[in-house]
């Protein structure tokens, strides 16, 4: 209770400070110099090679303050070891006591950890205990460390780039434990995310012994273990071996199965109850998430939008507020609309902008840090909705005098829901889907025991019980249409409605796939990225063509094949298209600069807004900025 009162006082103090500094209350919470305790932490999965253009520990360390502002407490580094096996998987290590030279040295990693510690953040390493690369050092120096069948080493799960380790050899066990100690000694890391703990080749006794040993290894040093597996519902043989966290894997799979279509609240509640019931009585907590490297790349290379559509926003709220420790996958905070090939360390496009997702995530992390009711294992109380509304899910969580109320509308249209059995009194609205794109806010509201709420499509509200300083959301930031370079081929689309907009294009080359850099047909059309708001409040989406030949036509679909805001429209390089208008209204010729306002006739000629023809197509092939086009425009 005293901690809660102290926090309220700090909020009031910050309200005065924020007026001068322009920081908001969420920043003040997330950048606190006090380390958040277990149960109120948020973990961030980082692929060092993807996180920055340089792809190094040093470069990533320079950006740790950004993660701190986002509300990150723990940075989980995907495998940092040298890679082998022929396909460059980070999960095919050649040596467990070395770093990938492209990322930097062990000293560089130690410096990264020290920078994180200065910010009151932890660093966990990805531990790959089941196997090594087929060309690992041990293959020649210690072949006895590997499982054998018929005198040959074994590929686990038919993964051709790795060999299975033999945990019935005590020397292998000792070598693996030495490696676990090595990183604590050399870099001062704080935990391990353990890969493929469900492997039948690793006995439960190994985990019991290793976890106990490492936790006791260094006096005053706390080491945390996260197991990649659904221990509560699947790998139940590992329930008592000592893991601190498991994956709520089955729960994430249930969310993904809903896809981008509408989700009925009853089925969502049933999946949540199954996850919560499985966790009852567990000695460990759970990590909840909507995506990670497996879901983003291994499962059909699906971005957050392609996997969930506009469900991605309310389902993110659910994953943060339902139970356990939430995970942010690198790039998720700017929309998560890249399929990141972690074999090749695809660089995250930090120019992508999804202010709704970023502001939602950083507000949720602030809630996780500041509200006692959101402790990992505090229970969920489902709120009765009367009369019934099959599209709305509502619940509270409590801890002492602290209470939080979450309301999710999973419908594709606005709705009204009447909640009963609420704690009457003063509440503070910390997260509102209708204004969060503009920035954070707080608004006091008296809620009755029975209260009616008006919710926008795929809308969400999170209330905190009590009285807090009010803050209005800032004015919307206007997005300036931007191309990354003069050779970029992009398509801009302005619309009043938020949806999953997808692109297909054809013409201009021997194969349609050249335009997108993908394989497959119509069914694999990729999604556009939400960049921000236009001056009129409409949303601006962008798609960058990845091939080397400009298409001649394109189609934009909305939430699937129909409706189609554009169907067979002529493509103008870096054209800015507005829903309801048959031609581009501007063309972006340089970074952030509009070249001219145009309309394009059906014969391909370009006119200015006064109706004067300013360019006409000339048949043939020519080269511009190193790219071929089937026709060129000639000034008249």
Image (cartoon, grey):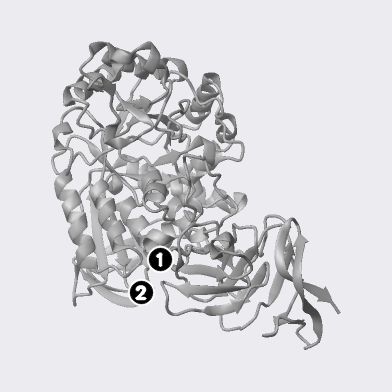
State the residue at coordinates (31%, 68%): 410
Q: Can see residue 73?
A: yes
State the residue at coordinates (14%, 37%): 236
Residue 7: image location, x then y, percent: 39, 44
Q: Is label 1 in a helix, a strand or a loop?
A: helix
Left or right of 532? Residue 592 is right
Taking depth in this image into account, of 522 and 180 the one nearest to the observer is: 522
Q: Is label 2 in a helix, a strand or a loop?
A: loop
Identify the mark at residue 310; answer none if there is no mark: 1
Pick whichever of labels 2 and 1 is earlier in the sequence.
1
Identify the mark at residue 589; answer none if there is no mark: none
Taking depth in this image into account, of 491 and 392 the one nearest to the observer is: 491
State the residue at coordinates (38%, 36%): 36
Relative to 438, say whether 78 is above or below: above
State how far apart marks 2 and 1 are (Cα): 9 Å
Q: Circle 2 is placed at which residue position?
A: 412
Left or right of 481? Residue 444 is left
Residue count near mark 2 (Cα–Cα under 10 Å), binned few <14, some 14–19, many ≥20: some
* Image quadrant containing the N terminus: top left
Residue count near mark 1 (Cα–Cα under 10 Å), binned few <14, some 14–19, many ≥20: many
Residue 352: image location, x then y, percent: 57, 55
Taking depth in this image into account, of 406 and 509 the one nearest to the observer is: 509
Residue 623: image location, x then y, percent: 76, 61
Relative to 324, say whether 458 is above or below: below
Q: Can see residue 217?
A: no
Q: Are marks 2 and 1 in contact (CB under 8 Å)?
A: yes
State the residue at coordinates (45%, 49%): 11
* Image quadrant containing the C terminus: bottom right
Farthest residue in the bottom direction? 611
Residue 614: image location, x then y, percent: 81, 80
């Amino acid at each position: 209770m005293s901690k809660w009162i102290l926090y309220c006082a700090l909020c009031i103090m910050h309200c005065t400070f924020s007026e001068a500094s322009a920081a908001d209350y969420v920043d003040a919470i997330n950048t606190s110099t006090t380390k958040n305790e277990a149960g109120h932490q948020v973990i961030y999965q980082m692929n060092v090679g993807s996180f920055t253009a340089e792809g190094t520990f040093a470069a990533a360390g320079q950006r740790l303050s950004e993660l701190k502002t986002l509300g990150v407490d723990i940075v989980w580094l995907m495998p940092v070891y040298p890679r082998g096996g022929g396909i460059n998987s980070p999960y095919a290590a050649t040596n467990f006591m070395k770093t990938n030279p492209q990322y930097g040295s062990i000293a560089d990693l130690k410096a990264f950890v020290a920078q994180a510690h200065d910010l009151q953040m932890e660093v966990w390493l990805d531990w790959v205990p089941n196997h090594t690369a087929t060309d690992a050092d041990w293959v020649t120096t210690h072949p006895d460390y590997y499982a054998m069948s018929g005198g040959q080493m074994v590929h686990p799960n038919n993964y051709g780039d790795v060999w299975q380790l033999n945990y019935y050899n005590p020397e292998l066990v000792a070598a693996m434990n030495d490696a676990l100690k090595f990183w604590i000694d050399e870099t001062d890391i704080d935990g391990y995310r353990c890969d493929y703990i469900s492997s039948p080749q690793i006995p439960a006794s190994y985990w019991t012994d290793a976890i106990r040993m490492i936790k006791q290894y260094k006096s005053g040093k706390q080491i945390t273990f996260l197991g990649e597996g659904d221990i509560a519902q699947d790998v139940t043989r590992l329930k008592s071996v000592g893991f601190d966290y498991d994956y709520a894997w089955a729960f994430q799979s249930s969310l993904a199965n809903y896809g981008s279509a509408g989700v009925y609240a009853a089925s969502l509640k049933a999946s949540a109850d199954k996850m919560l019931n499985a966790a009852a009585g567990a000695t460990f907590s759970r990590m909840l998430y909507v995506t990670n490297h497996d879901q983003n790349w291994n499962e059909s290379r699906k971005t957050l939008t392609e996997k969930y559509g506009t469900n991605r926003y309310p389902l993110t709220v659910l994953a943060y507020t339902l139970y356990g420790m939430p995970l942010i996958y690198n790039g998720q905070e700017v929309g998560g609309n890249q399929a990141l090939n972690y074999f090749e360390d695809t660089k995250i496009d930090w120019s992508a902008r999804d202010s709704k997702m970023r502001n939602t995530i950083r507000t949720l992390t602030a809630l996780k840090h500041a509200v006692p009711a959101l402790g990992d294992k505090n229970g969920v109380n489902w709120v009765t909705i009367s009369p019934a509304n099959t599209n709305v899910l509502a619940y509270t969580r409590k801890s002492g005098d602290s209470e939080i109320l979450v309301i999710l509308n999973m419908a594709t249209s606005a709705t009204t829901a009447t909640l009963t059995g609420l704690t009457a009194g003063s509440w503070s609205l910390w997260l509102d889907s209708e204004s969060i794109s503009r920035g954070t806010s707080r608004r006091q509201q008296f809620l009755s025991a029975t209260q009616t709420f008006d919710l926008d499509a795929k809308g969400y509200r999170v209330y905190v019980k009590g009285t807090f300083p009010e803050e209005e959301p800032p004015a919307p930031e206007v997005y300036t249409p931007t191309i990354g370079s003069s050779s970029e081929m992009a398509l801009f689309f302005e619309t009043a409605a938020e949806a999953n907009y997808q692109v297909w294009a054809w013409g201009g080359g021997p194969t349609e796939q050249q335009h997108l850099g993908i394989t497959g047909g119509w069914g694999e059309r990729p999604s556009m990225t939400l960049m921000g708001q236009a001056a009129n409040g409409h949303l601006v989406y962008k798609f960058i063509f990845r091939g080397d030949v400009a298409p001649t036509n394109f189609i934009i679909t909305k939430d699937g094949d129909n409706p189609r805001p554009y169907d067979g429209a002529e493509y103008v390089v870096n054209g800015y298209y507005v829903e309801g208008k048959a031609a581009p209204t501007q063309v972006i010729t340089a970074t952030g600069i509009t070249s001219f306002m145009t309309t394009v006739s059906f014969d391909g000629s370009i006119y200015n807004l006064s109706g004067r023809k300013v360019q006409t197509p000339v048949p043939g092939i020519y080269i511009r900025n190193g790219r071929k086009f089937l026709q060129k425009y000639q000034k008249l």
